[in-house]
Image: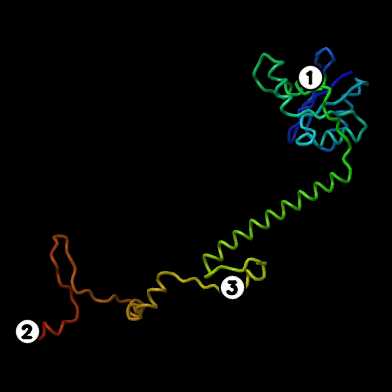
Amino acid sequence: MITIGIDPHKSSLTAVAVEPNGQTHRPIRAVVDKTTPEMLLAWAAQWPERQWAVEGATGLGRGIAQQLVAAGEAVLDVPAKLAARARLLGSSSARKTDVADAVSVAAVALHNRRLNRVQVEDHTTIMRLLTERRDDLVAEHTRWINRLHVLLRDLHPGGAEVRLDTTQASVLLAKIRPVTAATSNASESPGTSSATSNGTRPPSRTSTNSCGRQSTRAGPPSPRSKASGS
């Protein structure tokens, strides 16, 4: 019986037919699309007695494995660790190629009798996929709610309630008005604020020059200077 090993990838796959004595036939590389199963079956028609070995039939190779099983083919699930071990032990070269991986997958299926046979997915698989999708959505929603709570805690004293929805968050954000350092200083010193708004700066009595001496700038005279002048 011919064993066809498949090394699947996201957008392509490599298949190699291996004889029971280990002799390999010319490999085939295909792009993964809706016509891939038909092309593989047409290519494998030259070996009526055959079985398929897919690396990671429950992971990356799940799609092609299920399509082959639905077509009535015998498909074995080869774990990636076993395929990698067979590649290291069965090849003198450490170079990793798609063809070498496919041959290793077929070699594992030839010598290991404990591999799981791929079955057609039923309603339990569909329920598992829906459950995983729901768990992903709940985790994403929780992550965004936590980020929103952190933002509201920085902008609003005490933050928001634990049970927060989008409507409550929108109402709370609409009530928040930013308070900057400039506005807080203006509220503490109205005179400085009015002088600044008129475009003038309050006069400075003294300043220190580059030599360390104090020099008096122009400004309104003090009452003490008037008394000494008189």
Helix, strand or loop status at disc 3? helix
Asked if 72 appears above or below 136 in the picture, the reply is: above
In terms of sequence position, does the residue under pointer 3 or pointer 2 come before the other?
A: 3
**Residues at badges 3 and 1 in contact (C-beta under 8 Å)?**
no
Residue nearer the viewer, 230 or 35: 230
In terms of sequence position, does the residue under pointer 2 or pointer 1 come before the other?
A: 1
In terms of sequence position, does the residue under pointer 3 or pointer 1 come before the other?
A: 1
Residue nearer the viewer, 115 or 2: 115
Helix, strand or loop status at disc 2? helix
Q: List x then y, in percent, for residue 157.
A: 52, 70
On-image quarter of the C terminus:
bottom left
In the picture of the structure, the residue carrying the numbered disc 3 is: 174
In the picture of the structure, the residue carrying the numbered disc 1 is: 107
The answer to which quarter of the image holds residue 12 is top right
Left or right of 99? Residue 152 is: left
Write the residue at 6% across / 84% down. 229
Q: Residues within 10 Å of mark 2 (few under 14, many from 20)?
A: few
Give amino acid for label 2: Gly
Give amino acid for label 1: Ala
On-image quarter of the N terminus:
top right
Q: CA distance from mark 3 to mark 2?
A: 61 Å
**In this view, the mark in front (2 or 1):** 1
Q: CA distance from mark 2 to mark 1?
A: 112 Å
In the picture of the structure, the residue carrying the numbered disc 2 is: 229
Q: List x then y, in percent, for residue 121.
A: 87, 40
Residue nearer the viewer, 202 or 53: 53
